[in-house]
Amino acid sequence: MKTFRLNPNAILRAATSALLIALLPAQAPAQNQTTLTIAAYPAVDEMIKSAMPAWKKNHPTVDIKVISRQFSDHHTAMTTALSTASGLPDVMVLEYGYVARFAEGGGLENIGDAPYNFKNNTSHFVPYAVRQGTAGSGALVAVPSDIGPGTLLYREDLLKKAGLKESDLTHSWDGFINAGIKLKALTGANLVAHARDIKDILIRVGTTPGDGLYIDKKGTVLVDTPRFVRAFTLAKKVRDEKLDGKIQAWSNEWSEGFKRGTIATQLSGAWLAGHLNNWLAPSTKGLWRAAQLPENSYGSFGGSFYAIPKAAKNKALSWEFIQLMTLNPEIQLSGFKAQDAFPALLDVYKDPFFDQPIDFLGGQKARALWRDATSHITAFEVHKLDPLAEEIVNTELDKVLDQGKPVATALADAKRLLQRSVNR
Amino acid sequence: MSTPGVQRKPWRLKPEYVPYLLIGPFVILFAVFGIFPLVFSFYLAFQSWEPTAGLGAMKFVGMGNFAFVWGDEWFWKSMGNTLWLALASGIPQHVIAIPLAYFLHTSFKRSRNLVVGAYFLPYITSTVAIAMMFGTLFSTDYGLINIGLHTLSEIPGLSWVYPGQPIDWLNKAENVKPAISIVVFWRYIGFNTVLYLAALQTIPADIYEAATMDGAGRMQQFFYITLPSIKPMIYFGVTLSVIGGLQLFEEPFVLTGGRGGTDQAGMTTAMYMYRTAFEFNDFGGASAISWVSFVFVALLTWLTNLAFKPRRGSI
């Protein structure tokens, strides 16, 4: 009977070669070289790369490896890495919404206490950003790098055409809507891209530090409180008066709307001015201006933080790296200049760069305006169900705006749906 | 191989074990990427888990996740959306692919492969590229579809195709589902046409010749020869459509920016499952959704089987 023969020598040789090939890249660097792995998302990854010379000056034997992924992929990858405790980077960059969520799982190092003692340095940072980096337990788990103070960007040329002034937009929310009616009638432009934008700001107005946005510490659902009633009512008014373009942020229509001047204002983070200038609507240079949000409302739109996973290997080096990125004035300023990343470090707030005119905003010294806003912003408690709560509220708002569902019924339904998840 | 002097005894493999060795790589990969996730998701469906706290943080909750999903109105809304999309994109795929394949089979000779290739192209194109392209086409103010409809409506008698205002395809609940269905239909029609064309080519030409001799017209030949002969392929194609339709994810996900559109009108069960896990951080609930929807897919596949199974006495 014929049998198949497998030569043990050949198998051994094949296996050894395969192993050698697999190990080849790992063998390449010199023996005493350490590599620090940083997981980040776009814009922050660029800031890290441009800080390389400064890092190498003090740490010639420590290489930095930046693992860059798209925003949502990055956070999914970090969730997976924490859940399996494998593939964890030495330092992870986190968007503020994820900080408390990851901290709750206990996977992030408490950097407030020894050996890091970040609590001694918090006075260098914008207070609300420090609060955003604090877990529900009170542990400091992340250092703020850049923040997104909310602002109202508006088209000055359209306002002039309609015979309006900035104060007509900013005096009160009702005034904002009334100005929108006039704007639409005289210029044809929509006041806002989507009525939802107004709700997003208004549900945040009137919170005091420590409040929850959708759910409070005791698990009480807050979505039928006056904050939400007002936000829904005003958003509905904007839709009824046909003042919004029903345009989603980051869509083609959004960018076209900015280019063609059919969106007159946008409530957003200060960083949007940079995006408009760089790629969304560079041709509208000089036509935009920035103002504080209507009715002295202050809000934050995103922000990036640095954190160390508990299972990371080079914690001492990781901490040095984080300090370089967040406490070094030059690096914070260069991120602001190159990537429009508004610094979280108060030490740089007196730099002349803040008082320089911005060409895109017609020479306005808007950075000083945004700097002023940062001292008024409050941070609220993040709850792990916030992403679900936001989706529930948005879905009920869709029903109010598109199907004429009464505001009170919509908010009661939102509360019931959310309560069901809280009670699990 | 042998070394002079030392004669090593090669490892011998009995022929009956060879097939196992050959299918080994597949079985290992399938176990890692197929069976393990399946078992793990079944296990997860009975747990409550904060994933960032590590694997040790799972808590057994019995049937809690299933009870939650059963009473979850969003789950049922997503099931309704999925069924709507499966029917609206699935039925036309077959109703049009069969006559189309028949037309290609009978009317094209030399250029047939070229035409079939053109129809098949959407199937092998990246879904993300397709959805992005359609996202631009469906644009309310600047999209080619609305511009085309507007031009059509200027022809006398066709004014009804365009309702005065530009159609808001992707931001209005009642338009989201038809828009997604159009994309899914466009994408899979070529695949089904190729299936049916392959089936048509297996029908012996002499049956048609005999029918022609007997005076059967083209329509009669289609209904009495072609359709019964390709019934096994219809069964296969419909089964694929049922399974694919109930697992629809990529097209609605990209077209509606991951949210399912306004009022989640285009959120399928597969999308809801993904969002429950990765957006709402509830992996236990998401696993329960996947198992409940598996039961529905299995049930509908069984019903398809019942409807198309060759009965005794049929060809």
Image: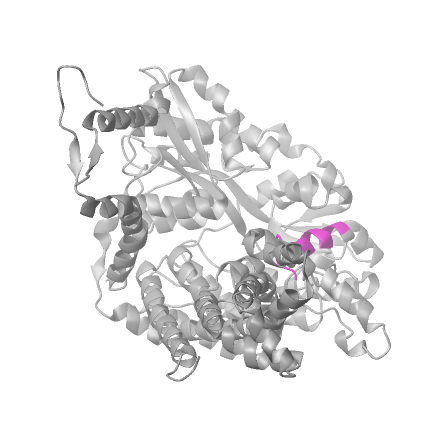
Percent position (x, y) of residue B288?
31, 66
- What's the residue at 37%, 23% (across, down)? A25
Q: How is the image coloured?
A: one colour
Please tell me whether the stretch drawn in magenta is mainly helix, strand or loop: helix
Q: Quadrant of the N terminus of chain A?
A: top left
Q: Quadrant of residue B67?
A: bottom left
> Visible in this render: residue B254?
yes
Q: Quadrant of residue B5?
A: top left
Q: Is residue B70 above or below residue A317?
A: below
What residue is at 41 percent from the left and 16 percent from the top? A58
State left or right for residue A210 relative to residue B21.
Answer: right
Residue A47 x, y percent position in the rendering: 52, 31
Residue at screen point 41% across, 71% down: B75
Magenta stretch: includes residue A258:
yes
Q: Is B175 part of what is drawn in magenta?
A: no
Front one among A412 and B86: B86
Q: Residue furthest right?
A: B156
The answer to whether A69 appears left or right of A369 in the picture is: left
Asked whether, in this view, residue A128 is left or right of residue A401, the answer is: left
| Residue B39 image point, x, y percent | 25, 58
Pick whichever, B78 or A419, lies toward us.
B78
Q: Can residue A406 be seen at all in this image of the molecule?
A: no
- Horizontally, residue B17 falls left or right of residue A204, namely left
Q: How many marks?
A: 0
The spot of residue A44 in percent (x, y) is 51, 36
| Quadrant showing the C terminus of chain A | bottom left
Which residue range is magenta in the image? A247-259
